[in-house]
Image: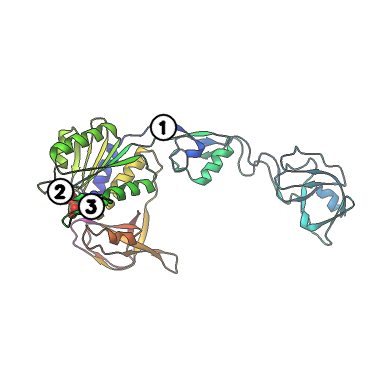
Amino acid sequence: MLTTAAALEAVLAAMPEFPAESVDVADLVGRVLRETVVAERDQPPFDRVMMDGIAVAYADYADGTRSFPIQATQAAGDPALTLEPGKAIEIMTGASLPEHADCIIPVERIHVEDGTARLEDGYDAGQQQFIHPRASDHAAGAELLWPGKRISPMDIAVIASCGLTTARVSREPVIRVISTGNELVPAGEPIEAHQIRMSNGPAIQALLGTHGYNNCTHDHIADEPELLRERIGAHVGAADILVLSGGVSMGKADYVPEVLKELGVERVFHKVSQRPGKPMWFGTGPDGQAVFALPGNPVSALVCCRQYVIPALEKAAAAAPVPPEFASLAGDVTFKPDLTCFQPVKLISNAAGQVLAMPVKTNTSGDFTALSATDGYVELAQEQSQFPAGTPVFLHRW
Ligand code: AMP
Ligand code: MG
């Protein structure tokens, strides 16, 4: 059986690259950048005054001057004035430093009377104080953001400061989430004793959404080969990515692999050496669509979605790879060494500043309520069976 590493590698290798598109700044947050953002101007673009107060020549202060006749007032947004010897210009935060001035004295340290600013007794001024020098953050033409960055609110400030109204980002893939199963009844509809509330569809959609993939609709299809063929066929024709849940195990009503084959979706693998999620199926459609068929058990479906679907989407969106994250196990874990175990965990931090992963027991892979108390899962290698507290392990946050 395929190892988890080989399965992930096969998924990533099969992913297309989503094309780029231009998007308005107002809609950019959370999208993956596909261009280099270059500084339009020096930052600051001029020697920027950092305090409300007066601008003086330090040489005058050094010569013993403590009273400065106020020559003029210059606010932020006004063109820079030229300071006359022995005088002061009343100045505001954000203003461009007046010509010949090289020292800002805060308004709290002066007393103004009859048009003259007098320094507080014993005030110790320094040359260049409270001046943010031109280009000290970066020069015009400096590269500020690179392709692959998922755009944060802070990046929006950078993009706007470069005078850009749009930026090139990866097109959002069209995703179809499909729940299969006769027993499933969506919330809001009456339910019988022998039926199950459908929870995977909304949960998978939500998980994709928290990773920035929102162009996603959901369909529920009964376990009937005809119906599955027709409806999945339509979805394959319309989507970039399909995420199915249920119907991939060995039961008589598990028609999904067979139906996908009939629809021309080529199998890349079926079954991975992992728990939960062993029956997972993955293939590619006639136009390069990625088709993930996840086991229906809710814990399996969510773990497989996070473990395979999210990295696949990140690769196709050309998102910069994130470095692996580690945590130390907070308690001993023992299990049969036959499969890689994705163990749901709650994260806590200790007084030494370490991130500890506290295993959270799920009562079989159907116990999705236990996941609500978790932050992610850790990966326990299949070669090992004893994992004492303190063992460093790969952490995958939801
Ligand atoms: P399957 O993989 O189709 O054999 O389903 C395995 C288990 O997961 C069964 O108990 C199903 O009822 C349950 N299940 C499948 N799909 C869903 C779903 N969308 N929401 C909640 N439970 C599901
Ligand atoms: Mg089923």
Q: Is residue 336 magenta?
A: yes
Residue 153 seen in the figure: yes
In the structure shown, which secondary structural element does the residue marked by tag 2 occupy?
A: loop
Three-letter code for the amino acid on which mark 3 is drawn:
Pro
Q: Please state which of residues 363 and 180 is positioned toward the viewer in this rendering.
A: 180
Three-letter code for the amino acid on which mark 2 is drawn:
Ser
Three-letter code for the amino acid on which mark 1 is drawn:
Ala
Q: Position of residue 124 (x, y in %)?
A: 79, 58
What range is drawn magenta here?
335-341
Q: Position of residue 310 (x, y in %)?
A: 33, 45
Q: Please say if 362 is above or below 83.
A: below
Find residue 99 and report its image quarter. top right
- Which mark is on residue 190? 3
Q: Please state which of residues 113 and 231 is positioned toward the viewer in this rendering.
A: 231
**In the shown orientation, is residue 2 left or right of residue 74?**
left
Which comes before the other along the chain, label 3 or label 2? 3
**In the shown orientation, is residue 66 left or right of residue 229?**
right
Which comes before the other along the chain, label 1 or label 3? 1
Q: Depth-wise, is mark 3 or mark 2 nearer the camera?
A: 3
Question: Which residue lies under the disc numbered 1?
Answer: 20
- What residue do we see at 33% from left, 45% from top? 311
In the structure shown, which secondary structural element does the residue marked by tag 3 occupy?
A: loop
Specify whether tag 2 is near ligand 1 (CB below 8 Å).
Answer: yes
In the structure shown, which secondary structural element does the residue marked by tag 1 occupy?
A: strand
Question: Which residue lies under the disc numbered 2?
Answer: 249
Q: Please say if 141 is above or below 204.
A: above
Residue 304 seen in the figure: no
Q: CA distance from mark 3 to mark 2?
A: 28 Å
Q: Is residue 365 magenta?
A: no
Q: Please state which of residues 262 and 44 is positioned toward the viewer in this rendering.
A: 262
Q: Position of residue 96 (x, y in %)?
A: 73, 41
Q: CA distance from mark 1 to mark 3?
A: 44 Å
